[in-house]
Image (cartoon, rainbow, N blue to C red):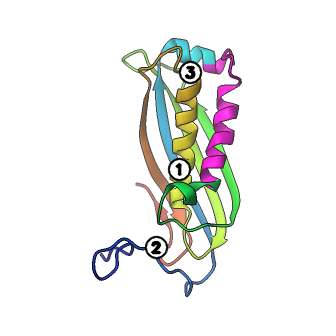
């Protein structure tokens, strides 16, 4: 497989998408933050002085989607048509007594390149915002399993993580 972000001399470059067709693009990414019971309860009961953690993190995740091209050097500026952050809160502790909060980011556009990086950035920024807002309670939280779970549009077609 050819790596498209390198020129013939191995130098990094932005891919020229000028000749590509405009298609509808969608990408869905997810990730988790693992927290202790005190953090979980504070988030769920909206007891953080900085504000409603998941509402603020949702806004931050959408902002991350929109600013992805400023963070990841070879990404294009895209006309995002929709960015959505959703949360799944597991009320059952794992075997270590910790709780998982899952973030799902869905990004859409009509363009010449995909929105996978935007979706991954949205999840990452949203989860980092959760960490930032509750770190005064517990700094042992773990952000994990950030990955692309689906994408569609463009030459490579439809992908769903198995």
The quadrant holding residue 142 is: top left
The nearer-to-camera label among 3 and 2 is 2
Residue 28 visible? The answer is no
Q: Furthest residue to the bottom? A: 19
Name the residue that disc number 2 marks: 14
Query: SS for tag 3?
Result: helix
Q: What stretch is highlighted in magenta?
A: 43-65
Q: Position of residue 153 (x, y in %)?
A: 56, 72
Which callout, 3 or 2, points at the residue further toward the start of the chain? 2
Q: Is residue 2 above or below residue 98?
A: below
Which callout, 1 or 3, points at the residue further toward the start of the chain? 1
Report the quarter where the C terminus lies: bottom left
Frontmost residue, 122 versus 145 = 122
Question: Residues under labels 1 and 3: Cα distance?
Answer: 20 Å
Q: Are marks 2 and 1 in contact (CB under 8 Å)?
A: no
What main secondary structure does the magenta stretch of the protein show? helix
Name the residue that disc number 1 marks: 121
Q: Where is residue 152 in the image (x, y as percent from the top left)?
A: 55, 67
Frontmost residue, 107 versus 151 = 107
In the shown orientation, is residue 10 left or right of residue 112? Answer: left
Q: Where is residue 10 in the image (x, y as percent from the top left)?
A: 28, 75
Query: SS for tag 2?
Result: loop
């Amino acid at each position: 497989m050819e790596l498209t972000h390198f020129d013939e001399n191995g130098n990094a470059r932005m891919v020229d998408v000028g000749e590509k067709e405009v298609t509808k693009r969608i990408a869905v990414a997810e990730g988790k933050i693992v927290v202790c019971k005190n953090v979980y309860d504070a988030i769920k009961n909206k007891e953080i002085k900085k504000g409603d953690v998941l509402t603020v993190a949702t806004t931050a995740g959408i902002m991350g989607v929109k600013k992805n091209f400023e963070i990841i050097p070879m990404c294009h500026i895209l006309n995002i048509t929709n960015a959505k952050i959703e949360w799944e809160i597991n009320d059952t502790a794992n075997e270590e007594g910790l709780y998982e909060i899952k973030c799902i980011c869905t990004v859409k556009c009509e363009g010449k390149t995909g929105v996978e990086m935007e979706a991954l950035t949205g999840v990452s920024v949203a989860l980092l915002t959760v960490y930032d807002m509750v770190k005064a309670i517990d700094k042992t939280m773990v952000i994990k399993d950030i990955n692309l779970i689906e994408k569609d549009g463009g030459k490579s077609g439809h992908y769903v993580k198995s």
